[in-house]
Every structure is written in structure tokens, then in C-alpha cells.
Amino acid sequence: MNKRPGIMLGALWCVLLLGAGGPVRASDATIPTADLGGFPAPVQAAITAARSSLEEALAEPGQPDRQALAWGQYGDVLFVHELLAQAREAYARARALQPDNQSWAYLQALVEVGANDPAAATAFLDEVLELAPDDVPALLRRGRMRLEAGQPDLAARDFERARGLAPQAPAALAGLGQVALAGERYAAAAEYLEQALALDPAASQLHHSLGMAYRGLGEIERARYHLERRGNRPASIVDPLFDAVRSKSRSSQFYVEMGLDLAATGRLEDAALAMQRAIQLDPDSRPALLNAGELLARLGNTAASRMVFERLVSLDPDDSRAWFYLGQLDELEGEPETALERYGRALAADAEESDARLALADLMFSRGDFRAAAVEYQRLRDGAGRVEEQTLYGLLLGASLLGAGDCERALAAAEQTLQTTGQAAVELTAMVVRLRATCGRNEPARRQAAVVLAEALYQQVPGQVSAEALAMAYAAAGSFDEAVELQMQAIFEALKSGGLEGRPDLRENLQRYESGQGAAAAYAPEHPLFSARRLGS
Amino acid sequence: MTILLGALTAPAAAQEPWFVDVASEAGVDFTYRNGMAGRFWFPEIMGGGVALLDYDNDGRLDIYLVQGGLMPGTAGDQKAAGGDRLFRNESFRDEDGRWVPRFRDVTRAAGIEAHGYGMGVATGDYDADGFTDLYLLNLGDNQLWRNNGDGTFSDVTGTAGVNDPGWSVSASFADLDGDGREELVVANYADYTVARNKECRSALTSQLDYCSPSTYAGVPDRLFHNLGDGRFEDATARAGLGDVARHGLGVIVADLDYDGRPDIYVANDGDPNSLWLNEGGLRFRDEAFLAGSAVNADGMTEAGMGVDAGDYNRSGAKDLFVTHMRAETNTLYRNEGDGWFTDVTSSAGLGVPSLSYTGFGTAWTDVNLDGWLDLVIGNGAVTLERDLVEAGSDFPYHQRNQLFLNEGNGRFREASEAAGPAFAVPNVTRGAAVGDLDNDGRPDVVFSNIEGPAQVLMNRMEIAGHWLGLELVDASGRRHATGSFAWLLDADAPPYLRHARADGSYASAQDPRLRFALGDSAAPRAVRVRWPDGSDEEFRGLAADRYHTLTQGEGVAVEGAR
């Protein structure tokens, strides 16, 4: 049930409902006006220009088609800037002049969607479909309206007809899936929704419905898989008329939203162009500048990206986000010292700018400044809200302390994180095992605790990470035969995954275990925890 | 005995409003002041709540209204707004038997000095002494006021250890570990301080406006474990709640998966809602997504504000209703009986009529005593209402409130117009509490409005049928046994249950008593009660048209679940 049928107008304001319901006479020449105070200058200019064109058209009687077009164009600029009452009236005037042109009724319907009046929208869509029964966008939108109004059977008719006309329309299949779901026909729902998602993989909203369908089928793991991938993007509707109207927006925010939509579907260059348009309309728009800078960086245009972020910090020297991105650019361009300074500026402006703190810590870590990195990772871990973040930061904290040569503190930090998160994160648990197996001397109780934890981990998540940890624990406890067997398995897993090449420590440890020695250290320098700049990100 | 409930509802002729605002005549003179000064500080648009409680155990519900005032950290006299107010119910029946509403401001006599920037209020009896205590939720330090039993309260926040210095909105007292003592669950909203206030503007017109919650990070909710000696311990991390930082607003505690343990449901603003399933030992697991109650049917995260749980379709399972922002629908999650929910908003007819409103306080209550739970909704925008801006309003966020009647077939119909002018007058409503202020069996409603007078709406519907009221009390004979439920034994299917609870809505606390519609028979009735420990007892010979106090252990013990 789509409650926001894809009319992306941003904030939907309730406006005075002018002229609703009654017929409109083409000869009534009063032009609806709006208080444009507060609108950005480009918006005011666009509306004023459209109004002037309309006045010119109205000054020449006997040209109904021209006048209809002028009314419609005036309606378009009002509509895209959410002056819905005035847009409603303008489209009604256009329609009165061209009653057989279904476009006006369709735009009237879209206005009513924006005004949160699905009943009125549906009535207009009925009229569109009387004039043009094969209008696929109208069928799809009416189907959604009917579904929202609790009329799944009627909605199914629209979606079926749309599918007949456009078999590859994901919104038709998605609609049929929603109808089936509402009727608790879970197998059919799953089939339709899978098809829709295959046609429109970016339609992340469908994952939720699919999850509910699999829940209904008792397939809980598949349900969870899709629920975790749920997003806010509905199945797309190919709608040239709506797209043409939307392109008349002179609102910077509109283009920011468009850019974000495009970026979400991977169209980065188009997204950057949309942000550029947003900046043209409002050169100081922070969201537009921020997004443009990030997109340009992702497209490899670091020079342009840098210019954008420098403009942001010139507008607001406390823009922590801009400082963070500048630091990222510095790192990309091999300027770590400058990057450190930028991250410092970001954190001075906003101590809770966690991306900047993480980047700062990572940079310190990669430069071997482990003690300083540990301080930052600890702050991140202690301030993290999500378990995944706590786990990652706890792991990095442990690694930093180990890098600083403080095995005992590394063990304490890893154990504390594990206890706090209460979840068996493989890497973190393996770290606790490795540290229990190697920290301190002659610690039989600790070594035994390493074995117990490692066996549980291996049993739960068999694989290279757990096998390596268990091998190390066995060796530390003097069980060398078992250690050799597990280490061989770890090597085999690494071979399978293509990860053996960069891990000479795997063979070195095997040789130590074969000769009755434990591992020399919890981690060798070649281990990804130390060789990669960041782990688990 | 068959109860023909639907046929007996005789909503009065159209000329008589169903609800009449008696606040002024009753002496409830209160306006929630948000301290606005043109800066559009985010918290200005979020408070405050109202509680209905019988603080002096005289059998009449009193009213507690939360006050805002000046934003913390700003210059000025915070006490000037007057602080929270407690209004004692001193209503009476005149010589003609007519109920005369009278409430007296007893705040000072009660010793309550609540001058924080108030958001919400929760009621409970944390020390099980039989007197209802108050927990106040603020922007800044919260307060626990212990009811001393002599008409006064004492601030015991420090000794009890239940402060939360952040921004809290709603809370619920509930026995979560089955030891007979009430824990405290606090819904926290956002990581906000005036010092870190951010300026937000309308995307379209660049006018200053209130921010969206995403401007500020969410924060974890809190769970305080009742140690039984007047103190609580912060069990948030142990319970698992500390792992999730969201924008919590409304909260209810109820056994939603029917495993005998009460669960926690939090309506989050702009984040997925949380359904914390109780795994025992004060450990919880959020299963809202798989349960189908995290987001709407489309998978969209919504702006959850208020929430209430009630069995609207008489399936025996508690359903959830969550209020949302304009352009989103409010959402009805139907409980399929096992704690799995389905969004049935559209088929219930509750979607389209809510699209134009931003809902906050809400409650399930059977306003017309037809045996089916109806919905009361308090509305008020959070972003500028353009038509009101153009009309020159100095606080352009007003919307009217709504009443939906349950038609008994899974569908609702809006009856706001028939409810009367009290529902038609636009306000910026936040708190909503439902209770029977005049003990006539008909639920009344109190709304708290930002920069507008609080409304005390007396239910004046002409209802032909009889009713039965219950107050469920634990074995000590003192504490309300919230979390228990009762059902009429002589009612035909579908099952007719009512649940005892004081939480729900938005930032508010409800009348914990239960009411059953009895139809045209005034004969004494029997009920079975399922107490929070899972035991069942029957109580027979309960006369109609009055409230009865049922104490655990005083009924006839029965075996087996219904």
C-alpha cells in the first residue's frame, strides 16, 4: 500500500483549497495569485514569468489552445513549488479550455495527491482513464490510490491492465504483489515482488513487502534477509509528463533531492549535475554544496570537490562536515599532515563528528601513532550507539593498544567490548582468544579460557578466522597436535579464498606449532588488522 | 447471554455534541507555554503531556498537567510559567443529580515544584504503598515525585536513582521481571541542548521553522530496575536497550506476544519503531521488523509520535495504533495473535482521513460503550501550516482533533464532527489522556495544547446500555495491577477483554480502570481476571453501572487459560 505515491514534492503543505469541486468556466479570467514572499528569487522569477505569459495569452481572445497551454504552464510552476491551491485552479482553467486533453486531468490528480486528498485524485484519474484507457502511469497511480483506500480488488484491476500494456513495468508487478500480500496470498506476493525487484533493483521499498511475504510463508531467514535491505524507494513509474513538470522547479532543494535520488541509483554524473543546478539556484545552499563536493570526489574530480568544500568553510568556518571532507581529500592526495589538521578543525567545530574522529584515528593508526589512535578509538567506542560500531571501535582500540605494545590493556579493552556488546562478533572474539593465548607469561588459567572461548567460536562460526584463533589457543595450552590440525585448516581456507599470498605468518605459526612452540605474538604485522588501514569498515 | 452491543449505541441526535469542554467552568485554567521567542527551538513544538490519576484515593480522577516555560539555558525566570499543575477533582452532583465539574489547583499544597521544561508524565506506584506516584519527563533532569499518601508528594529522584538528564518525553511503569515491583521505562528523544541548537528553515521558502528529528542524533531509551527499597538501578545496558539510539516519543508496555512477559513498544520519530520482546531476566530483543511493527506496510519509516495498545477487533490480542505526521497516515498494526503484526490501516479506513494531520496523543477507548474500542487522536502540526501563516497566525501549527468510531467489522469511521465543537476547534494538541472523570462509565478526554488552553472534554453521549467498571488491584490490596486483564464470562464470542494500563498515548498517563459495555441488561455479571503472574480468578455477582475494586487473591482461583 503506497501511501506516498511517488510525488516527490518535499514538504506537502496544506493550502487553501480554492475552487474545489465546481466547474470552471473558460471565460473566467481571474488569475490565481500567491504570496511569493519568502520564496527564493529564482522561484519568484519563474512564477512571475509564467504569469506574464499567461496574461499575454489571455489578452488575445479566440485562441483557446494557446490559453490552455499558458494556464497549464502557469499551473506547472505553481505545482512544482507546492502552491497547490493556485495550481489546482490553473489546471482547472486549462482543462476547461481543452476538456479532451487528458494531461490536464492527470495533473489535477497529481495536485490532489500532493494535497493529501486521494479521493479527489482518484476521481481525476478516473477521468483520465475515460479519455485514455491505456494511460499506464494513470493506471498505476490509480491502483496505488485504490490500494491505499482499502480497495485491493479494484487496485488489482488497474495493476493487471497496466501489466498487460507494459509487461516490464515494475510498479505494476509491485502493485500486484502488494495486493496479494494484503489478501494474505503470500506465495503469489513473493513471486510478483521478486519479479518487480529483478526489474527495478533500486526499488528498495519492495524488500519490506517481500520480507512480510516470506514471513507469511514461514521462511523466516529469507524474511530477515529482505527486511534488513528495506529502503524508501518505491518501484519506479515511467512518467514523462510528470518528469517534464518536475523539471520546471526552480527550488534548490528540489534539485538536491533529485540528485540524491539519482545517486542512490548509481547515476553519479547525473546526480552531480542536479547538485550543480541546485547550486546555481542557491549558491549558498549547504546541502547542495556538501552533496556536490562528495559526488565530485566520488567521480574522481578532487580538484572541483576541494573547491566546493573550501567554499563551504568560507561560508561557515565551523562546518565540521566540510572540514572532514577536506581532510579526506588531503588523504587521497597524499597529504596526511594537512588531513590531520583538517580533522582537528572538524572536531573542534563539532566534537561529535564521528566520521572525522574515525578518520583521524585511522590516520594515526596507519602512521604508527598507536597510543594517540587508541585514545580516539576509545572515545568512538564509548560514544557509539550501535553494537556494530561498538564492536568495530573496540576491535580497533584493541589493535591500537597492541600496536603500542600494551598487550594487557589490549586484552582488557577487547574483553570489555565483548562484554558490553554481548554479541559474538567473530573478529572481536578471535582477538580476545589471541590475546588470552599470548599476553603475559605462564598464565594457564588464561590460556584455558582462550581454548574454551575459541572452541565455542569455532563451533559457532567455523572458518579461517576461528580456526586460526583456536589453533593459537591450543598451542598456547600445549595441545600442539590439535593446533597443527586447526592451523592447516586455516591455511586451506585462506588458500580457497585467495588470501594465502599475503599471509606468511600462517605458515610460520604452523611451523612453530609443529615444533612445539606457541605463537610468537597475537598478530603478525602482515595480519589484515595491521596491514589494512581499517578493518571491518 | 447475548450482548447486542451495536444496537444499543444510540449516539444522540445530531444537535447534541458528544463531548463538551468544561475546563473553564470546572476551574482547569491551564495553558502549556512553550517559551517561544522566534528562535524556533526544536523542543518548543514537542510538549506537553497530561495524566489522569486518583492521587488521593477518593475514587475520583484528578488531572496533572505538564508545563513548559522557558527553554533551559535561556535568560529569564523559569518559574514565571507557573510549573506543572495538579488539579484535584472536587466535582459533585447537585440536587438534581447533575454532575457539577469542579477542579481545584492543589499543586502548592501537594508540595510539587516542577519547574523543568516539561514534556511528559507517567503514573505508577513504584513503592507499592497504594498511592500513585508521578514521574515527570523533561528537557533536562527528570523527576520522580513520591506520593506520601497524605495529599503531598516528595521529590525522590536522587535517592531513587531515576534521573535522565537528556530529553525524555514518555515513560511507563510496569513490572517487567515479575517480582511485583514496577520498573520504569523512559522513551528518550534526541541529543539536544539549547547551546547546540541548529537553525532550520523551510526547504521551499527559507522561512525559519522547526527542525526535523534527524537534525539531532537519537538517544537510547532507558530502563530502570526497581530494587524494592525505594531505589532503582539503571539496567539499560543489561536489558539491551542501550544498543539502539533512536528518537523515542511514545511508549507502552504490554505482553504483545502472549508469552506471559510484558514487552516494550516504542514509537520512534523518523526511525523504525522498537518492539523489545521480553526474554526474561530483564533482557530484551528488538524484533520490530520481523514482527511487522517497525515500519508501515510499504516499509517506510514514519514519524511515530503517540502509541496505544488495545484489542480493537476483539481477537484477544492487543493491537497497536501509532500516530504520525502529515502526509503519512497514522498506522494500525493488527496483532495476528502471536505478536506478529500486519499494517491494516488502509482496510480499516484510518489511512486517508489522517493524511492531513500530524497526530500526537491517542488512546483506544470505547466512547459510545458499544463494546468496540474507538480512537481518540490529538493533532497539531510540527512545521508551518501555510494557510495559517498567510492568515497571520503567530503560532501557525493548529489542527483539529479527531474521533474514529469502531464499526465492529474491522473498519472505523470518522466521527469528529459529531463529537462536537470541542473536537473542531483547532489546537496544537500534544498530550491526550482518557478516563472517567465523573464515574458514569463514559470515558472522558483531556487534551493538553501548546499555547492554548487545556481541554477537559466530558462525554455526554446518550447511551442506552449498561456498563461495568473494574479497578484491578494486586495481592497487597494497594497497587493497581497494570498488565493484568479481564474478560466478561457471559459474553458471546468474540472475546471481550479489557486491559489495565496507565501508559500509552503521548507524554501522558491514563485512567487504569477498565470498563465493559453490558448492553441492555443490568443483571450482575461475572468476570475472569488474568493477573500479571499468570494466575486466573473469577469474580461473580458484580452489579452493573458502577466500579468494583477486584483484589488479587479475593476471587475464586481457576485453572487453565482461556
Image (cartoon, coloured by chain):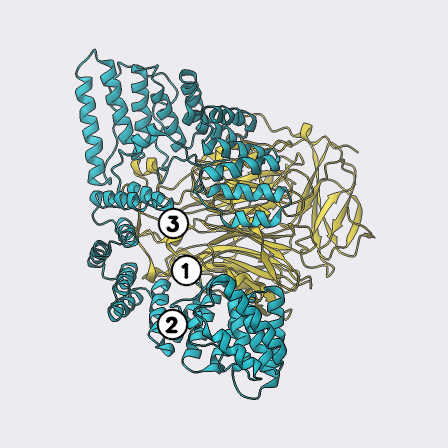
Chain colours: A cyan, B yellow
Query: Do the residues at pointers 3 and 1 share their chain?
Result: yes
- Reading the image, the residue beneath label 3 is B212
Q: Residue at x 30, y 38 (%)?
A: B392
Q: Residue at x 25, y 21 (%)?
A: A69
Q: Are marks 2 and 1 on the same chain?
A: no
Q: Amino acid at mark 3?
A: Ser
The residue mark sitting in front, 2 or 1, is 2
* Above or below, B452 relative to A444: above
Chain ID of residue with mark 2: A
Q: Is residue A447 left or right of residue B112?
A: right
- Give whichever of A331, B454 is nearer the camera: A331
Residue kind at label 1, given as amino acid type: Asp
Mark closer to the chain start, 3 or 1: 1
Give B134 or A445, whichever is nearer the viewer: A445
Q: Quadrant of residue A65?
A: top left
Mark 2 lies on residue: A376
Q: CA distance from mark 2 to mark 3?
A: 30 Å
Residue tagged 1: B191
Determine which quarter of the picture holds residue B364.
top right
Q: Quadrant of the C terminus of chain A?
A: bottom left
